[in-house]
Image: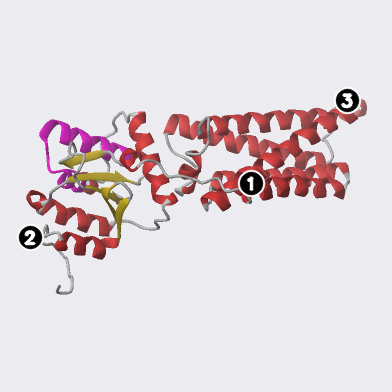
Amino acid sequence: MMALWSRFRLPPLAQLALLGVTFAAAAFLSLEVWMQAVRHTSLCTTTGCAVVGEYIRFGEGNLLKLGAAFFWLLWLVAFFAGRYPKAWIWGGFGLLVAGALAFDGTLLGFQFVALREFCLICAITGGLLGLTVAATAWVRRSIGVLVLGLAAWSGGFAGSAVLDFQVQPPVLQDTVFVSWGDTQNATARRHVLFFSFHCGHCSKVLANLAINLEHLTDAWYLAALDGREEDFFRMVAVQKALAEKQENPFVAVLREESVEHPAPVAVPEALRQTVRNARSYFKTKGFDGVPVLVVWEGPGRELILRGETAIFRYLRDQGWLERTLMVNLPPQ
């Protein structure tokens, strides 16, 4: 009986910690892959993840899948390294971890320095990778593992941080999901309103545009920054209303905004990409709140209006505020 028990005894605590951390990292990334593929949501609630994902050459989803596969492989190697403590197995495990640390440092250096963004998924993954190094040092009883791991990560981070990547935002026209007005005229001014379905200031701007629609000239576009699945349903409904009824676009948005639980509909991938473009443009331009109105007046000439007060002053100066709702502006 004792011989049988000895064959099934638990690994040492340090080995259990290493297996637990690598399993947690693999499960975390696998859950994120599943949520994005099936639920079209994410564990990350910030816009940073969407912005960072725009700069992945083969797509954010593929990067997450590769990350999950890597940590499952790492867990498997750690399991066999604990069960069969061969030098070459631990050597392979160390190479995998060192490469992952350099990769993670490079990715986070690009995010924090070049993009000035915080991606929650990447930060958690980096933290789990750091715990993996700490657990490995515990298993191997070597402080040198920690030092080498820190050196690999710091080298990747510093190398990425010192480079000027000249990050460019998406083209402004690729950020909009509905348009109205003289959109076919190449010389017309293009007004792009960045808004959220959950912003009272945006609603006020939209309401005033709605009651003054007949006075507006040039081209008008709407760019939504919301990433919830229900908000995509709202956008699809707005597009459908404009296509079928030629409805006032601002009224259509306000109506969908007031619906607490919009009906589920199929969301085209093109619409999801448009919203990702809008969020990327918004962040890389340094905007930090909605509403924002970008007025494209010609090549190299853009007017940026941040906040409802600046937007209303512009509308008044253009003679477009014939009627107003809840607007208090100083006299001209």
Return the residue at label 2.
Answer: 322
Q: Residue at x 62, y 33 (%)?
A: 67
Q: Which numbered mark, 2 or 1, is in the foreground of this view?
A: 1
- Which badge, 3 or 2, is on the more N-terminal residue? 3
How many residues crowd mark 2 within 10 Å: few (<14), some (14–19), many (20+)? few
Residue 14 is situated, as x and y percent measured from the top left of the image, at 82, 43
Measured Cα–Cα span from mark 2 to mark 1: 52 Å
Q: Are marks 3 and 1 in contact (CB under 8 Å)?
A: no
Among all residues in the image, which is located at the extreme right?
Answer: 3
The boundaries of the magenta stretch are 231-254
Total labels: the figure holds 3
State the quadrant of the N terminus. Answer: top right
Q: Residue at x 36, y 38 (%)?
A: 229
Residue 160 tag number: 1
Is 281 left or right of 126, judged from the image as shown?
Answer: left
- Which badge, 2 or 1, is on the more N-terminal residue? 1
Residue 194 is situated, as x and y percent measured from the top left of the image, at 30, 50
Q: Residue at x 20, y 58 (%)?
A: 204
Is 162 left or right of 291, judged from the image as shown?
Answer: right
How many residues crowd mark 3 within 10 Å: few (<14), some (14–19), many (20+)? few
Q: Secondary structure at mark 1?
A: helix
Measured Cα–Cα span from mark 3 to mark 2: 88 Å
296 up-or-down from 56: above or below: below
Return the residue at label 3.
Answer: 4
Q: Secondary structure at mark 2?
A: loop
| Residue type at the position of mark 1 | Ser
